[in-house]
Image (cartoon, rainbow, N blue to C red):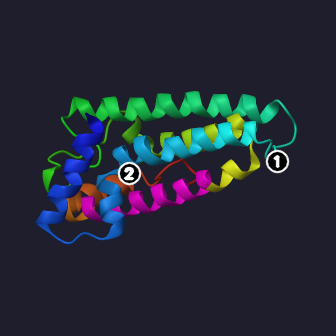
Amino acid sequence: MQLVAGAWNIVKERRMNKDSLLDRYRLAKSTVGIAIEFPILIGGGIAGIVLSWPRLPFYPLPNILGVVLLVVGYVIHGYAHKEMKKYGVQAHQHSVQVRTLVTSGPYSKVRHPGYLGLVLIYFGFALGFAVVWMLIPAVIFTILTYLTAIKEEELLKERFEKEYQEYARQVPWRFIPRIV
């Protein structure tokens, strides 16, 4: 059902205006994650093990760290979505549909906790399988997620103007408090 809803958002947005590729990726982020990103990370990891691709050193430390990152990433991502739901905000909505700026819960610490959770999940899969080549899609998906966050900030600045500027001043970190 989520795949259909995500695909429908893309179709609606294309009809409304000509969005950039990054805009379309942003609007379809949940669908892309389920249909493309996670299958690449999981399928690539399994293929890497079955086909004996080069492994990360220090077995089993990468595997353990990967599982920890996966669990922490899912908890952070879920907490961020739960906080948005409290305010009736859905992830990856078009900026004209967003009525409320969520600034509580994990959003009081970083501006993109959901994306932080996703990045941890990407690297959790890569390290969990301990296949060297799986770091490549993890890095690519992280860059796309970072660019998506930047684009969302631009849209939120337009939509909420001074309220968002004040929020960004109070919460200067995008992903990790006191670092990034």
Tag count in the figure? 2
Q: Mark 1 points at which residue?
A: 54
What is the crowding at mark 2: few (fewer than 14 residues within 10 Å), some, or many (at least 20)? few
Identify the residue shown where x is 74% and y is 37%. 49
Q: Which residue is more in the foreground, 119 or 140?
A: 140
Q: Is the magenta stretch mostly helix, strand or loop?
A: helix
Q: In this view, does 140 lie to the left or right of 14?
A: right
Residues shaded magenta: 137-156
Q: Nearer the viewer, mark 2 or mark 1?
A: 1
Q: Name the residue under label 2.
A: 170
Residue 65 visible in the displayed image: yes
Q: Is residue 170 above or below residue 129?
A: below
Asked if residue 48 lies in the magenta stretch, the reply is no
Q: In this view, does 21 lie to the left or right of 47?
A: left
Q: In which quarter of the image is residue 136?
A: bottom right
Kind of residue indicated by mark 1: Pro
Q: Which of marks 2 and 1 is nearer the N terminus?
A: 1
Identify the residue shown where x is 25% and y is 33%. 1
- Residue 167 percent coordinates (x, y): 32, 52
Q: Is mark 2 on a helix, strand or loop?
A: helix
